Amino acid sequence: MTVTQTSGTGAEPLTDLCASAEVSHPRPDGRDRYTISEVAAFTGLSAHTLRWYERIGLMPHVDRSHTGQRRFTNRDLDWLAFVGKLRLTGMPVADMVRYAELVREGDHTFAERQELLRATREDVRRRIAELQSTLAILDFKIDFYADARRASERF
């Protein structure tokens, strides 16, 4: 999902991209109509998960074909990539749904969205520190055993 607003000075637009600018899409914009199975294959998410995301409000409105089949766009793929990053952070689904609701509500929710992301960033930083500490212990133990093996090989 892309949100464009003018900056505080009104001079230039700000763009809220949900994925990095380097994301490549299978099809160019304008020809980007994907079935649910294509999106499942591209994202690694199951069709069931994609339907669930839509049902709980995590996905924005997904267009439908004249036969009622979902038709996803590159914007939907960008949104799903962003949701995937949020999942990796450990953000609870309820918070992800709240974030999606805030995006749909518009620009006046920037402060609340920012706070949700700041809190998640702090959780991620705590987990990274915890993992770095754990890694240091593992490195110590691996070095200990390597030294012990070298010492035992000398005798």
Image: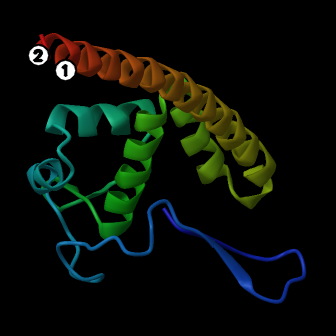
Residue 31, image x, y percentages: 21, 81
Asked which quadrant contains residue 129, the reply is top right
Please give the label number shown on residue 24.
none
Q: Which residue is mark 2?
A: 153
Residue 13 in the image: above or below residue 75? below
Residue 91 in the image: above or below residue 22? above
User: Tag 2: residue type?
Assistant: Glu
* Horizontal arrangement in the rendering, residue 111 relative to residue 116 (left or right): right
Asked which quadrant contains residue 98, the reply is top right
Residue 110, image x, y percentages: 75, 53
User: Tag 1: residue type?
Assistant: Arg
Q: For the point 16% across and 10% down, which residue is it? A: 152
Q: Label 1: state its secondary structure.
A: helix
In front of the other: 116 or 58: 116
- Residue 61 appears in the rendering: no
Q: For the point 85% across and 84% down, which residue is it? A: 10
Q: Are marks 2 and 1 in contact (CB under 8 Å)?
A: yes
* Horizontal arrangement in the rendering, residue 51 relative to residue 132 (left or right): left
Q: Label 2: state its secondary structure.
A: helix
Residue 136, image x, y percentages: 47, 25
* Horizontal arrangement in the rendering, residue 96 relative to residue 76 (left or right): right
Within 10 Å of disc 1 (Cα), the crowding (few <14, some 14-19, many 20+) is few
Q: For the point 9% across and 50% down, which residue is it? A: 37
* Horizontal arrangement in the rendering, residue 104 relative to residue 149 (left or right): right
Residue 145 in the image: above or below residue 75? above
In front of the other: 83 or 5: 83
Q: Which residue is mark 1?
A: 150
